[in-house]
Image (cartoon, rainbow, N blue to C red):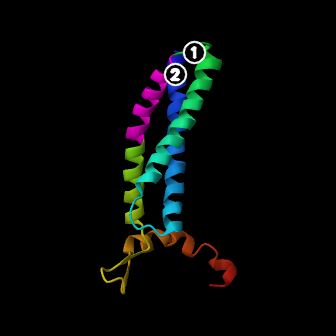
Amino acid sequence: MYTVLTYFVSLIVMVVSVFITLVFKNELERMFGEKEDVFPFHICNVLITLMVSFGANAVMSIYIIGNESNLLLQFVILLLMILPIYIFGHLAFEKYKSVYRKYIPTENRKVVVLNEKYLKKKRLPSKLKNYNAISKGK
């Protein structure tokens, strides 16, 4: 029972950590002007997520369960849990970035084509267009 609770807490910590590290990776790539993914950022993200989830797992197993298990085994189990979550999160994040990109440059980088999905996302709902019309005198 406590083992399931320990892994469930570790899973929640992993998902949050993967999301945060992917956001930071995106901002670092934008800051450094990288157009494609940088592999060392992925390695650092997986290591950071592994450290955070390993810490959460160790705290839960030592202080809640009260026993110390094989740390190397826990390390391998957590790594095998992190890799699919990170890959799925990365693919979902890349799809979201590509769909809601503000503009798409052409091959010669001179013409910019606005993305219509981004423009549709930024429009106000029709309910809010006339929200304050009485006070404006319309």
Residue 115, image x, y percentages: 38, 75
Q: Residue at x 54, y 31 (%)?
A: 54
**Total count of labels:** 2
Q: Nearer the viewer, residue 35 or 96?
A: 35
Do labels 1 and 2 touch, CB within 8 Å?
yes
Percent position of residue 110, x then y: 36, 87
Label 2 sits on what residue type?
Leu
Q: Main secondary structure of the magenta part?
A: helix
Relative to residue 58, is residue 51 depicted above or below?
below
Residue 29 shown left or right of residue 110 in the figure: right
Frontmost residue, 138 versus 30: 30
Relative horizontal placement of residue 133, taking residue 22 as reference (left or right): right
Gap in Å between the C-alphas at discs 1 and 2?
Answer: 8 Å
Question: Which residue is situated farthest in the right direction here?
Answer: 135
The residue indicated by pointer 1 is: 68
> Which kind of residue does numbered mark 1 sit on?
Glu
Q: Which mark is residue 71?
A: 2
Q: Percent from the top left, x then y, of residue 59?
A: 62, 25
Q: Of all residues shown, which one is farthest toward the top?
A: 67
Residue 134, x across and y down, in percent: 66, 78
Q: Is residue 115 magenta?
A: no
Q: Which mark is residue 16?
A: none
Instruction: State which region is magenta.
Output: 70-85
Quarter of the image that includes the C terminus: bottom right
43 w.r.t. 4: above or below: below
